[in-house]
Image (tube, coloured by chain):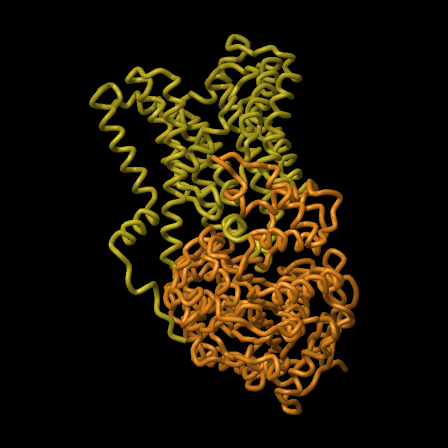
Chain colours: A yellow, B orange
């Protein structure tokens, strides 16, 4: 049964594509480097330790939620409701902390994750039991959860002076050298990395997104896996919400409004395939970093926030188009 | 004492009201290769999926080692020692070779961490024992079809199953690879495993199996020891029915040649196809699903481009590169899958019929809907489409009426050559007869028809001549007088020297 490995002939061009496809992170890293050089030339203050700590602080929440979004997208789904889950959990936790200033930080975090898990479970149930396409299900809960923010808060905001100082330090304190929030993001990234790459359930997530029918034949319980990723998405959104309140020292009815698009952007820019089955954690981290650097530098070189949004949108398009294009080239060379 | 490792008793199964298996019984002993035989749609694959827990029987009982079992999903059947190679390739394109073999059963350490080193060593050992050389870290997406098939086989073997189901495992292997596979199957059998083997290549059945069970139209026909049956016996058991007088093909004096195809080849799909089609003639194209007939049709219609060979229309050599061009040349193609390629279900009847002729019905880019409407109305009336009115959405019609709309659509283009791909699949008997009568009438009016059908009585009853394809090759050519079911099945299942997938 000798079967020749790999097609014998391949053009140099295809080889190049292969290299890019295989080391997607290298491509992004290069892009980031070029951007950094360009920005530093115009605004030397960009390349300082302080500024970088600022960027890391800014993207920590994005990283946590983008990791969850990545797992969802790998199963060929999407969770648009993350921003509303953050908004709702943020409001609830802020109220509790305001009423009980003595609440320990860890308890607040656990509470946020618990509420988030309930919201995630609801998403998961609609999608698996209700058999509703993820984009529609989470579009619905995006609105429902946001509506619940208004109902819960009766339109009021919780401001900085109403929150205890300890709680505000929860995200920004630096007992370990780096801000807690950055450490938490790194911790979550490590856990997710381990989970996705070194456990059976993690590999099942890839399998379900890669070929759902084959997953059924292979004895993978796809519905459970799909349920699980939305649950995780809820939990991590809950965690992000607590950090959000602590960092921005407020909970508003529009907290995290539109944030879901940034998490999707970080994922797809980081090479996660919107058709499922493909994606790496280093890629997503770089994707989030790229978004963070763009935001930071566009401010530094004094470009209006309106352009920042446009630049982000453009980036998503470029990433997705090149993703499709590379994939189609790779597939065409299969036979 | 029960000598059967697996026993199926009176299994029935329906999909959306259509019974695909009716009280089918089947038994399997340790150490035997039991072949399962039947035409396309006889219910073999469904039966296999019931054994593995993909589908659940509506009635009947499954006994494993004499005990009744009920598998909720394939995980449970795997744990009970049942492995399967499915007809559809079922790998994960984004995962590598080794992980595809062990997915869901990756070796883990005590802490639940996947033991990647062990996984690769095991995969390496397994592939070596199968005599396959594959790069373990290669993504499945980059493998050839034959290589993918090998990974599937390795996966099934890795389960160390007591029952191994192989649904057409050799369909994309060369003879050499198939022979190697058989060597392995015999080794498993000697170890006491029981193997269910599904294949359309009768030679393989005789070479490999001990007993054979035949299914026909979802019903059990018979089980016999292979040494007691002949090839002809099996074909008779598979075909069974006699041709009723449902096919009113009128004798028409065939006119001049309108379409001539010479050595048409599309790499990976079909090779060296030659035939001619005359005015007033119905040319039947028989063969098993996947024999490449649809690919030939799609090449004639400009959907897929042939890699070599020539197509002549009225003796003039042409290159058809798009459906628009094909329509302009007077070709019409009624595709196999109505829902997917034939109709736009949410659109109404008028719009559906008018689609290929929009340019004709338009002036300066504006659609003249009066013209479109009257054309659609006439075509629908001619086809006797049964609907409330011509504004009804296509999806609300029955399968038979949908097919009539598709036919009306293509006939309104006034074609000279009509390609029909499985025109009566899944439609009721009455409409079927109407479609057959229409075909006959169209032929008598001088239309040249290429009829692709997997239903033998239809091909035999409607065609003036029949060509048979098998695995991309033309393996038979019969006149109406010569053709019999046995001859066609024989040509459609004969082993060809080399597979084209390599």
Residue A102 visible in rendering: no
Residue B172 percent location from the top left of the image = 48, 71
- In this rendering, the answer to whether B248 lies above or below A22 is below
Q: Answer left or right for A95 relative to B401.
A: left
What residue lies at 49% left-to-right and 15% top-to-bottom?
A: A249
Q: Considering depth in this image, is B302 or B497 the residue closer to the camera?
A: B302
- Which residue extends farthest top? A161
Question: From the image, which quarter does the N terminus of chain A lie in?
Answer: bottom left
Question: From the image, which quarter does the C terminus of chain A lie in?
Answer: bottom left
Q: Considering depth in this image, is A281 or A123 the residue closer to the camera?
A: A123
Q: Give residue B57's quadrant in the image.
A: bottom right
Q: Considering depth in this image, is B224 or B408 the residue closer to the camera?
A: B408
The count of marks equals: 0
Q: Give residue B78's quadrant in the image.
A: bottom right
Q: Answer left or right for A104 relative to A11.
A: right
Residue A216 percent location from the top left of the image = 60, 56
What residue lies at 53% left-to-right and 23% top-to-bottom?
A: A105
Residue A92 percent location from the top left of the image = 61, 20
Q: Give residue B4's quadrant in the image.
A: bottom right
- In this rendering, the answer to whether B491 lies above or below A20 is below
Residue A18 percent location from the top left of the image = 32, 51
- Which residue extends farthest left? A41
- In this rendering, the answer to whether B403 lies above or below A320 is below
Q: Considering depth in this image, is B47 or B122 the residue closer to the camera?
A: B47
Residue B405 visible in rendering: yes
């Amino acid at each position: 049964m000798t079967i020749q490995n790999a097609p014998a002939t391949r053009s140099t061009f295809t080889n190049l594509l292969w290299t890019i496809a295989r080391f997607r992170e290298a491509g992004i890293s290069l892009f980031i480097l070029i951007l950094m050089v360009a920005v530093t030339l115009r605004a030397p203050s960009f390349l300082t330790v302080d500024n970088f700590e600022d960027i890391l602080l800014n993207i920590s929440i994005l990283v946590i939620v983008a990791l969850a979004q990545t797992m969802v997208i790998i199963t060929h789904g999407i969770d648009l409701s993350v921003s509303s889950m953050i908004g709702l959990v943020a409001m609830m936790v802020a109220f509790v902390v305001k009423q009980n200033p003595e609440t320990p930080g860890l308890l607040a975090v656990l509470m946020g994750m618990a509420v988030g898990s309930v919201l995630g479970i609801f998403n998961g149930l609609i999608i698996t039991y209700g058999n509703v396409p993820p984009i529609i299900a989470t579009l619905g809960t995006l609105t429902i959860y946001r509506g619940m923010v208004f109902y819960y808060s009766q339109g009021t905001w919780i401001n900085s002076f109403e929150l205890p100082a300890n709680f505000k330090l929860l995200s920004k304190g630096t007992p370990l050298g780096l801000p807690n929030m950055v450490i938490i993001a790194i911790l979550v990234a490590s856990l997710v990395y381990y989970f996705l790459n070194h456990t059976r359930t993690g590999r099942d997530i890839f399998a379900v997104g890669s070929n759902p029918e084959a997953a059924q034949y292979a004895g993978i319980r796809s519905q459970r896996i799909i349920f699980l990723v939305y649950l995780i998405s809820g939990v991590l959104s809950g965690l992000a919400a607590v950090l959000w309140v602590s960092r921005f020292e407020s909970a508003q009815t529009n907290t995290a409004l539109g944030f879901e698009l940034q998490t999707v952007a970080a994922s797809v820019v980081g090479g996660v395939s919107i058709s499922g089955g493909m994606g790496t954690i280093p890629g997503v981290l770089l994707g989030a970093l790229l978004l963070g650097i763009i935001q930071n530098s566009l401010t530094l070189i004094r470009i209006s926030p309106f352009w920042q949004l446009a630049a982000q949108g453009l980036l998503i398009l470029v990433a997705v188009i090149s993703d499709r294009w590379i994939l189609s080239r790779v597939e065409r060379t299969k036979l | 004492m029960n000598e059967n490792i697996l026993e199926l008793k009176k299994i029935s199964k329906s999909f959306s009201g259509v019974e695909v298996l009716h009280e089918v019984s089947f038994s399997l002993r340790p150490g035997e290769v039991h072949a399962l035989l039947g035409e396309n749609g006889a219910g073999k694959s469904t039966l296999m999926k019931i054994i593995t827990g993909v589908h659940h029987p509506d009635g009947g009982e499954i006994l494993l080692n004499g005990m009744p079992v009920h598998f909720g999903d394939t995980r449970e059947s795997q744990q009970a020692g049942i492995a399967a190679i499915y007809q559809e390739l079922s790998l994960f394109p984004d995962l590598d070779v080794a992980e595809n073999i062990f997915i869901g059963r990756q070796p883990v350490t005590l802490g639940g961490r996947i033991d990647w080193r062990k996984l690769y060593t095991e995969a390496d050992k397994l592939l070596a024992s199968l005599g396959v050389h594959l790069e373990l870290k290669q993504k499945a997406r980059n493998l050839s079809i034959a290589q993918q098939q090998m990974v599937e086989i390795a996966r099934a073997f890795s389960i160390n199953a007591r029952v191994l189901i192989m649904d057409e495992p050799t369909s994309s292997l060369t003879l050499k690879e198939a022979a190697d596979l058989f060597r392995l199957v015999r080794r498993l059998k000697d170890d006491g495993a029981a193997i269910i083997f599904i294949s359309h290549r009768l030679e393989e059945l005789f070479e490999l199996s001990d007993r054979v069970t035949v299914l026909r139209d979802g019903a059990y026909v018979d089980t016999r020891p292979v040494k007691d049956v002949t090839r002809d016996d099996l074909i008779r058991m598979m075909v069974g029915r006699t041709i009723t007088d449902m096919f009113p093909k009128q004798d028409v004096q065939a006119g001049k040649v309108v379409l001539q195809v010479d050595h048409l080849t599309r790499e990976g799909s079909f090779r060296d196809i030659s035939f001619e089609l005359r005015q007033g003639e119905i040319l039947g194209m028989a063969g098993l699903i996947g024999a490449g007939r649809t690919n030939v049709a799609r090449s004639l219609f400009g959907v897929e481009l042939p890699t070599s060979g020539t197509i002549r229309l009225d003796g003039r050599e042409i290159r058809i590169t798009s459906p628009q061009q094909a329509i302009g040349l007077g070709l019409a193609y009624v595709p196999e899958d109505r829902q997917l390629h034939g109709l736009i279900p949410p659109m109404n009847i008028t719009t559906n019929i008018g689609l290929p002729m929009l340019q004709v019905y338009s002036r300066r880019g504006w659609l003249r809907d009066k013209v479109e409407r009257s054309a659609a109305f006439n075509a629908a009336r001619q086809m006797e489409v049964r609907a409330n009115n011509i504004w009804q959405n296509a999806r609300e019609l029955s399968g038979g009426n949908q097919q009539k709309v598709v036919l009306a659509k293509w006939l309104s283009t006034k074609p000279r050559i009509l390609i029909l791909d499985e025109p009566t699949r899944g439609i009721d008997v009455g409409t079927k007869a109407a479609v057959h009568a229409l075909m006959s009438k169209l032929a008598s009016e001088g239309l040249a028809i290429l009829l692709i059908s997997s239903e033998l009585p239809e091909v035999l009853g409607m065609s003036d001549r029949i060509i048979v394809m098998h695995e991309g090759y033309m393996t038979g050519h019969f006149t109406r007088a010569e053709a019999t079911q046995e001859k066609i099945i024989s040509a459609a299942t004969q082993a060809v020297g080399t597979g084209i997938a390599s």
